[in-house]
Amino acid sequence: MTPANIVGMAAVKELAIIAVTDHNSCKNCPAILTMAEQYGILAIPGMELCTMEEVHVLCLFSKLQDAMDFDAFVSTKLIKIPNNEKIFGKQEIYNTMDQCIGTEPYLLINATEIPFGQLDEIMKRFHGIYIPAHIDKNANSLLSNLGFIPPDSQFLCAEVKDLSHLQDLHKTNPYLDKCRIIANSDAHALAQIQEPIHYLPVENRSIEAVLEALVKSD
């Protein structure tokens, strides 16, 4: 799962747009964006944030610098548990030549000290959008961990793992009626990167247009 291999597989799959969202880190985004440009693929810088409640949230940015500023902020909120590579695997950082230039010393799948309820304000500060991830899963999701959607939430997009769950989710969570619902491969290995089976209508081929489409309800 190096930047070149990720982008190369996306090209083989003929994907037009990808987003790279490592757990609690954006440090591989610069290499990914450089590689994607070479392949003619639009890559969105982002992160899969793990909140204080262990809710997974996709955070996406139109500008790489905003993503890196957010990365620096999250680093200050990460609970400092040293990573055990024998158990959790390597947490490598790559350059634009697909060379490992460092590692993340602290466990990235761990929770941060960022509560879900503060994400509206935080993401406005860093000019990004946030999307509760795989809300239909029974672990590390908004609905499984909190048990409900906070009434003061302002997110306009949510991600599901299995679209067949969508009707039941709408019945029990009317908040979702105003949201764009997306599904993606959530790939943690090259073979899990999906074919282009899901589509998103956008005004033009730009990150800004994609993010705008994601928070535009049907």
Image (spheres, rainbow, N blue to C red):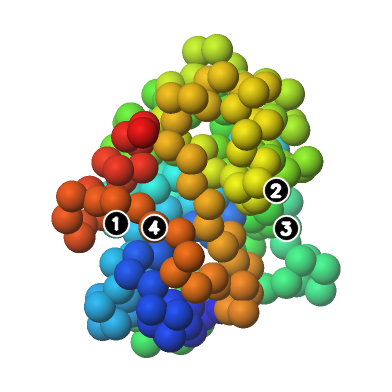
User: Disc 1, disc 4: CB below 8 Å?
Assistant: no
Q: Distance between the residues labelled 3 and 2?
A: 10 Å
**Residue indicated by mark 4:** 199
Of mark 4 and mark 3, the one earlier in the sequence is 3
Q: Looking at the rendered structure, which numbered label has been put on residue 64?
A: 1
Percent of width and height locating residue 151: 55, 12
Q: Distance between the residues labelled 2 and 4?
A: 32 Å
**Residue indicated by mark 2:** 110
Percent of width and height locating residue 197: 48, 65
Of mark 3 and mark 2, the one earlier in the sequence is 3
Q: Taking 166 as reference, is 44 above or below it?
A: below
Q: What residue type is labelled 3?
A: Pro
Q: Looking at the rendered structure, which numbered label has been put on residue 19?
A: none
Percent of width and height locating residue 46: 42, 53
Closer-to-camera residue (22/197): 197
**Left or right of residue 54: residue 153:** left
Q: Taking 34 as reference, is 63 above or below it?
A: above
Q: Which amino acid does label 2 sit on?
A: Asn
Percent of width and height locating residue 200: 35, 53
Q: Looking at the rendered structure, which numbered label has been put on residue 82?
A: 3
